[in-house]
Image (tube, rainbow, N blue to C red):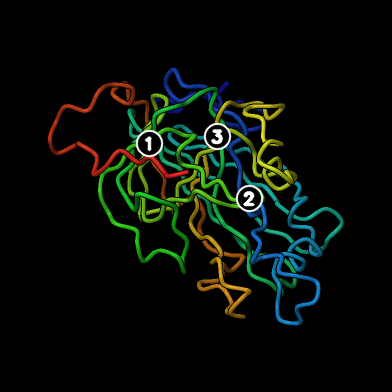
Amino acid sequence: MITLGPAVFDARTGALRTIGAVPVTGLRLDVWRATTDNDDGAAWQSDLRYGPLWRGLGLHRTRHRLDTVEAGEDALTVRTRVAPAGRELGLSAVYRWTSDGDRLRLTVSTVPDGDWTVPLPRLGIRFGLAAADRVRWYGGGPGEAYPDTRTASRIARWQSTVDELQTPYVRPQENGARIDVRRAELDGLRVEGDPAYWFTARRWTTEQLDAAAHRTDLVPGSGSGAGVWVHLDHGQHGIGSQSLRSGPAAPVPPAGRAGGVLVRLLPDPRCGDQVTDTAEKPGVLYAPIG
Protein backbone atom coordinates (compact mmCIF):
# COMPACT_ATOMS: atom_id res chain seq x y z
CA MET A 1 0.00 0.00 0.00
CA ILE A 2 0.99 3.62 -0.63
CA THR A 3 -0.05 6.39 1.78
CA LEU A 4 -0.35 9.96 0.50
CA GLY A 5 -1.85 12.49 2.91
CA PRO A 6 -5.25 11.17 4.01
CA ALA A 7 -5.38 8.55 1.23
CA VAL A 8 -4.27 4.96 0.80
CA PHE A 9 -3.52 3.50 -2.67
CA ASP A 10 -2.85 0.02 -4.00
CA ALA A 11 0.90 -0.11 -4.63
CA ARG A 12 0.60 -2.40 -7.64
CA THR A 13 -2.23 -0.69 -9.55
CA GLY A 14 -2.16 2.83 -8.13
CA ALA A 15 -5.89 2.52 -7.39
CA LEU A 16 -7.32 4.75 -4.67
CA ARG A 17 -8.62 2.63 -1.77
CA THR A 18 -9.58 5.03 1.03
CA ILE A 19 -9.68 8.73 1.87
CA GLY A 20 -9.62 9.00 5.64
CA ALA A 21 -12.17 6.44 6.80
CA VAL A 22 -14.12 6.51 3.49
CA PRO A 23 -13.61 3.49 1.19
CA VAL A 24 -13.41 4.37 -2.51
CA THR A 25 -13.63 1.96 -5.43
CA GLY A 26 -13.29 2.04 -9.20
CA LEU A 27 -11.95 5.58 -9.70
CA ARG A 28 -11.19 6.01 -13.39
CA LEU A 29 -11.63 8.18 -16.46
CA ASP A 30 -15.14 8.02 -17.90
CA VAL A 31 -16.17 9.01 -21.43
CA TRP A 32 -19.50 7.18 -21.81
CA ARG A 33 -23.04 8.10 -20.87
CA ALA A 34 -26.35 6.27 -21.15
CA THR A 35 -27.55 7.70 -24.45
CA THR A 36 -30.56 10.01 -24.36
CA ASP A 37 -33.56 9.91 -26.67
CA ASN A 38 -32.05 12.85 -28.54
CA ASP A 39 -28.65 11.12 -28.79
CA ASP A 40 -30.28 8.08 -30.41
CA GLY A 41 -32.93 9.86 -32.47
CA ALA A 42 -34.99 7.61 -34.76
CA ALA A 43 -33.97 5.31 -37.58
CA TRP A 44 -35.95 7.34 -40.13
CA GLN A 45 -34.11 10.57 -39.31
CA SER A 46 -31.41 11.50 -41.80
CA ASP A 47 -29.68 14.17 -39.68
CA LEU A 48 -26.68 13.56 -37.43
CA ARG A 49 -27.36 11.21 -34.51
CA TYR A 50 -24.46 10.89 -32.07
CA GLY A 51 -25.77 7.88 -30.16
CA PRO A 52 -25.30 5.42 -33.06
CA LEU A 53 -21.94 7.02 -33.92
CA TRP A 54 -20.68 6.58 -30.34
CA ARG A 55 -21.79 2.97 -30.22
CA GLY A 56 -20.34 2.29 -33.66
CA LEU A 57 -17.01 3.59 -32.39
CA GLY A 58 -17.32 1.35 -29.31
CA LEU A 59 -17.29 4.07 -26.64
CA HIS A 60 -19.77 2.01 -24.60
CA ARG A 61 -17.15 -0.75 -24.21
CA THR A 62 -13.94 1.09 -23.43
CA ARG A 63 -11.06 -0.77 -21.82
CA HIS A 64 -8.55 0.62 -19.33
CA ARG A 65 -4.92 -0.50 -19.57
CA LEU A 66 -2.47 0.27 -16.79
CA ASP A 67 0.92 1.36 -18.14
CA THR A 68 2.95 2.60 -15.15
CA VAL A 69 2.66 3.50 -11.48
CA GLU A 70 5.25 6.06 -10.36
CA ALA A 71 5.41 6.73 -6.62
CA GLY A 72 7.44 9.62 -5.20
CA GLU A 73 7.83 11.18 -1.78
CA ASP A 74 5.04 13.70 -2.32
CA ALA A 75 3.20 12.50 -5.44
CA LEU A 76 1.76 9.45 -7.17
CA THR A 77 1.45 9.31 -10.96
CA VAL A 78 -0.57 6.63 -12.75
CA ARG A 79 -0.37 6.38 -16.54
CA THR A 80 -3.08 4.50 -18.45
CA ARG A 81 -4.58 4.07 -21.90
CA VAL A 82 -8.33 4.17 -22.36
CA ALA A 83 -9.66 2.87 -25.67
CA PRO A 84 -12.68 1.17 -27.26
CA ALA A 85 -12.15 -2.57 -27.61
CA GLY A 86 -10.75 -3.53 -31.03
CA ARG A 87 -10.04 0.06 -32.12
CA GLU A 88 -6.76 1.82 -32.93
CA LEU A 89 -7.79 5.13 -31.41
CA GLY A 90 -7.80 5.88 -27.71
CA LEU A 91 -6.86 8.30 -24.96
CA SER A 92 -3.67 8.45 -22.95
CA ALA A 93 -4.75 9.37 -19.43
CA VAL A 94 -2.41 10.47 -16.64
CA TYR A 95 -3.63 10.66 -13.04
CA ARG A 96 -1.39 12.78 -10.82
CA TRP A 97 -2.08 12.68 -7.08
CA THR A 98 -0.54 15.09 -4.58
CA SER A 99 -1.37 16.11 -1.02
CA ASP A 100 -0.79 18.96 1.40
CA GLY A 101 -1.24 16.57 4.31
CA ASP A 102 -4.98 17.05 4.86
CA ARG A 103 -6.33 17.23 1.33
CA LEU A 104 -5.81 14.99 -1.67
CA ARG A 105 -5.42 16.67 -5.03
CA LEU A 106 -6.02 14.95 -8.37
CA THR A 107 -5.27 16.25 -11.84
CA VAL A 108 -6.24 14.06 -14.79
CA SER A 109 -4.79 14.91 -18.20
CA THR A 110 -5.86 13.26 -21.45
CA VAL A 111 -4.20 13.18 -24.87
CA PRO A 112 -6.05 11.71 -27.89
CA ASP A 113 -4.39 8.98 -29.93
CA GLY A 114 -5.65 8.12 -33.41
CA ASP A 115 -8.26 9.62 -35.70
CA TRP A 116 -11.15 10.90 -33.58
CA THR A 117 -14.07 11.94 -35.80
CA VAL A 118 -16.75 12.49 -33.12
CA PRO A 119 -16.91 14.42 -29.85
CA LEU A 120 -17.12 12.51 -26.57
CA PRO A 121 -20.36 11.92 -24.65
CA ARG A 122 -18.58 13.15 -21.52
CA LEU A 123 -15.10 13.67 -20.13
CA GLY A 124 -14.57 13.19 -16.43
CA ILE A 125 -13.92 10.72 -13.64
CA ARG A 126 -16.17 8.40 -11.70
CA PHE A 127 -15.79 6.46 -8.48
CA GLY A 128 -17.89 4.34 -6.15
CA LEU A 129 -18.73 4.79 -2.48
CA ALA A 130 -20.05 2.11 -0.18
CA ALA A 131 -23.07 4.22 0.77
CA ALA A 132 -24.38 7.77 0.68
CA ASP A 133 -27.76 9.37 1.15
CA ARG A 134 -27.64 13.10 1.83
CA VAL A 135 -25.79 15.32 -0.66
CA ARG A 136 -24.92 18.99 -0.23
CA TRP A 137 -23.39 21.09 -2.97
CA TYR A 138 -22.51 24.64 -3.86
CA GLY A 139 -23.24 25.17 -7.53
CA GLY A 140 -26.06 25.00 -10.03
CA GLY A 141 -29.50 23.81 -8.95
CA PRO A 142 -32.05 22.86 -8.02
CA GLY A 143 -32.61 20.50 -11.00
CA GLU A 144 -30.44 18.87 -13.64
CA ALA A 145 -28.63 20.98 -16.22
CA TYR A 146 -26.52 20.38 -19.32
CA PRO A 147 -24.66 22.80 -21.61
CA ASP A 148 -27.81 23.68 -23.58
CA THR A 149 -30.42 23.22 -20.80
CA ARG A 150 -28.90 25.37 -18.08
CA THR A 151 -31.05 28.51 -18.23
CA ALA A 152 -33.04 27.68 -15.08
CA SER A 153 -29.95 26.66 -13.07
CA ARG A 154 -29.09 29.02 -10.22
CA ILE A 155 -25.82 29.10 -8.26
CA ALA A 156 -26.55 28.58 -4.56
CA ARG A 157 -26.12 26.09 -1.74
CA TRP A 158 -28.38 23.08 -2.16
CA GLN A 159 -29.07 19.77 -0.52
CA SER A 160 -30.88 16.63 -1.59
CA THR A 161 -30.89 12.87 -1.30
CA VAL A 162 -29.16 10.74 -3.91
CA ASP A 163 -32.53 9.35 -5.00
CA GLU A 164 -34.02 12.82 -5.47
CA LEU A 165 -31.14 13.82 -7.74
CA GLN A 166 -32.49 11.48 -10.42
CA THR A 167 -34.84 12.67 -13.18
CA PRO A 168 -37.38 9.86 -13.80
CA TYR A 169 -37.55 9.79 -17.59
CA VAL A 170 -39.86 7.11 -19.03
CA ARG A 171 -36.88 5.42 -20.67
CA PRO A 172 -33.77 5.35 -18.43
CA GLN A 173 -31.02 7.57 -19.85
CA GLU A 174 -28.39 10.11 -18.85
CA ASN A 175 -29.88 12.47 -16.27
CA GLY A 176 -29.35 14.25 -13.00
CA ALA A 177 -26.17 16.28 -13.62
CA ARG A 178 -25.74 19.47 -11.61
CA ILE A 179 -23.75 22.15 -13.38
CA ASP A 180 -21.05 24.59 -12.20
CA VAL A 181 -20.48 22.77 -8.90
CA ARG A 182 -17.64 24.18 -6.82
CA ARG A 183 -18.01 21.88 -3.85
CA ALA A 184 -19.99 18.74 -3.02
CA GLU A 185 -20.22 16.77 0.21
CA LEU A 186 -21.48 13.24 0.72
CA ASP A 187 -20.71 10.23 2.93
CA GLY A 188 -17.96 11.94 4.90
CA LEU A 189 -16.21 13.14 1.74
CA ARG A 190 -15.81 16.65 0.36
CA VAL A 191 -15.00 17.22 -3.32
CA GLU A 192 -13.72 20.64 -4.40
CA GLY A 193 -13.25 21.61 -8.04
CA ASP A 194 -11.02 24.18 -9.70
CA PRO A 195 -12.69 25.20 -11.94
CA ALA A 196 -16.26 24.03 -11.42
CA TYR A 197 -17.50 20.64 -12.60
CA TRP A 198 -20.65 18.69 -13.41
CA PHE A 199 -21.71 16.56 -10.44
CA THR A 200 -23.81 13.39 -10.65
CA ALA A 201 -24.52 10.72 -8.04
CA ARG A 202 -26.68 7.64 -8.56
CA ARG A 203 -27.15 4.15 -7.14
CA TRP A 204 -26.20 2.31 -10.35
CA THR A 205 -23.43 2.47 -12.89
CA THR A 206 -23.66 4.15 -16.26
CA GLU A 207 -23.57 0.70 -17.85
CA GLN A 208 -26.59 -0.42 -15.80
CA LEU A 209 -28.45 2.77 -16.67
CA ASP A 210 -27.62 2.31 -20.35
CA ALA A 211 -28.82 -1.31 -20.36
CA ALA A 212 -32.15 -0.57 -18.62
CA ALA A 213 -35.29 -0.45 -20.76
CA HIS A 214 -37.58 0.54 -17.86
CA ARG A 215 -37.05 2.28 -14.53
CA THR A 216 -37.93 -0.97 -12.75
CA ASP A 217 -34.81 -2.52 -14.31
CA LEU A 218 -32.64 -0.27 -12.15
CA VAL A 219 -31.81 -2.03 -8.88
CA PRO A 220 -29.67 0.05 -6.46
CA GLY A 221 -26.21 -1.43 -5.94
CA SER A 222 -27.00 -4.62 -7.87
CA GLY A 223 -23.69 -6.16 -8.86
CA SER A 224 -21.97 -2.78 -9.23
CA GLY A 225 -19.51 -3.13 -6.35
CA ALA A 226 -20.64 0.13 -4.71
CA GLY A 227 -23.73 1.68 -3.17
CA VAL A 228 -23.40 5.03 -4.96
CA TRP A 229 -21.49 6.04 -8.08
CA VAL A 230 -20.21 9.62 -8.28
CA HIS A 231 -19.33 11.41 -11.53
CA LEU A 232 -17.20 14.56 -11.67
CA ASP A 233 -17.21 15.79 -15.26
CA HIS A 234 -15.03 18.38 -16.95
CA GLY A 235 -17.34 18.30 -19.98
CA GLN A 236 -20.77 16.94 -20.89
CA HIS A 237 -22.29 16.66 -24.35
CA GLY A 238 -25.38 18.83 -24.80
CA ILE A 239 -28.91 17.45 -25.02
CA GLY A 240 -30.03 18.97 -28.33
CA SER A 241 -33.53 18.55 -29.81
CA GLN A 242 -34.31 15.93 -32.43
CA SER A 243 -37.86 17.26 -32.78
CA LEU A 244 -36.50 20.66 -33.82
CA ARG A 245 -33.53 19.14 -35.69
CA SER A 246 -31.27 21.15 -33.42
CA GLY A 247 -27.87 19.72 -32.57
CA PRO A 248 -26.44 19.81 -29.04
CA ALA A 249 -24.35 22.68 -27.81
CA ALA A 250 -20.78 22.43 -26.50
CA PRO A 251 -19.47 19.16 -27.98
CA VAL A 252 -16.72 17.60 -25.82
CA PRO A 253 -13.37 17.16 -27.62
CA PRO A 254 -11.37 13.99 -26.80
CA ALA A 255 -8.55 15.92 -25.13
CA GLY A 256 -7.99 18.14 -22.17
CA ARG A 257 -8.09 17.67 -18.45
CA ALA A 258 -10.82 15.64 -16.84
CA GLY A 259 -12.45 15.72 -13.44
CA GLY A 260 -12.75 19.51 -13.43
CA VAL A 261 -9.03 20.00 -14.22
CA LEU A 262 -8.26 19.94 -10.50
CA VAL A 263 -10.18 17.99 -7.90
CA ARG A 264 -9.47 18.05 -4.18
CA LEU A 265 -10.82 15.18 -2.13
CA LEU A 266 -10.75 15.31 1.63
CA PRO A 267 -12.39 13.56 4.56
CA ASP A 268 -15.07 15.80 6.05
CA PRO A 269 -16.64 14.62 9.31
CA ARG A 270 -19.18 17.47 9.09
CA CYS A 271 -20.85 16.03 5.99
CA GLY A 272 -23.42 14.06 7.93
CA ASP A 273 -24.13 16.83 10.43
CA GLN A 274 -27.05 19.23 10.47
CA VAL A 275 -26.32 22.58 8.82
CA THR A 276 -26.31 25.27 11.49
CA ASP A 277 -24.26 28.17 10.15
CA THR A 278 -26.46 30.64 8.26
CA ALA A 279 -23.80 31.07 5.58
CA GLU A 280 -23.84 27.32 4.95
CA LYS A 281 -27.60 26.85 4.69
CA PRO A 282 -28.78 25.48 1.33
CA GLY A 283 -30.82 27.61 -1.01
CA VAL A 284 -33.59 25.02 -1.01
CA LEU A 285 -34.30 21.44 -0.07
CA TYR A 286 -34.61 19.92 -3.53
CA ALA A 287 -37.54 17.58 -3.91
CA PRO A 288 -38.54 16.99 -7.54
CA ILE A 289 -42.23 16.72 -8.38
CA GLY A 290 -43.46 13.39 -9.62
Q: CA distance from mark 1 to mark 2?
A: 22 Å
Label 2 neighbourhood size at 10 Å, few (<14), some (14-19), many (20+)?
A: few
Examine the rendered structure and indicate whether residue 134 appears above or below residue 283: above
Q: Which mark is residue 59?
A: none
Q: Give the x, y percent position of residue 200.
A: 49, 45
* Residue of label 3: 71
Q: Give the x, y percent position of residue 14.
A: 61, 33
Label 3 neighbourhood size at 10 Å, few (<14), some (14-19), many (20+)?
A: some
Quadrant containing the N terminus is top right
* Residue of label 1: 160
Q: Are marks 1 and 2 in contact (CB under 8 Å)?
A: no
Q: Which mark is residue 170?
A: 2
Dot 2: element:
loop
For marks 1 and 2, the one nearer the N-term is 1
For marks 2 and 3, the one nearer the N-term is 3
Return the residue nearer the eye: 126 or 279: 279
Which residue sits at x=70%, y=43%? 214
Q: CA distance from mark 2 to mark 3?
A: 47 Å
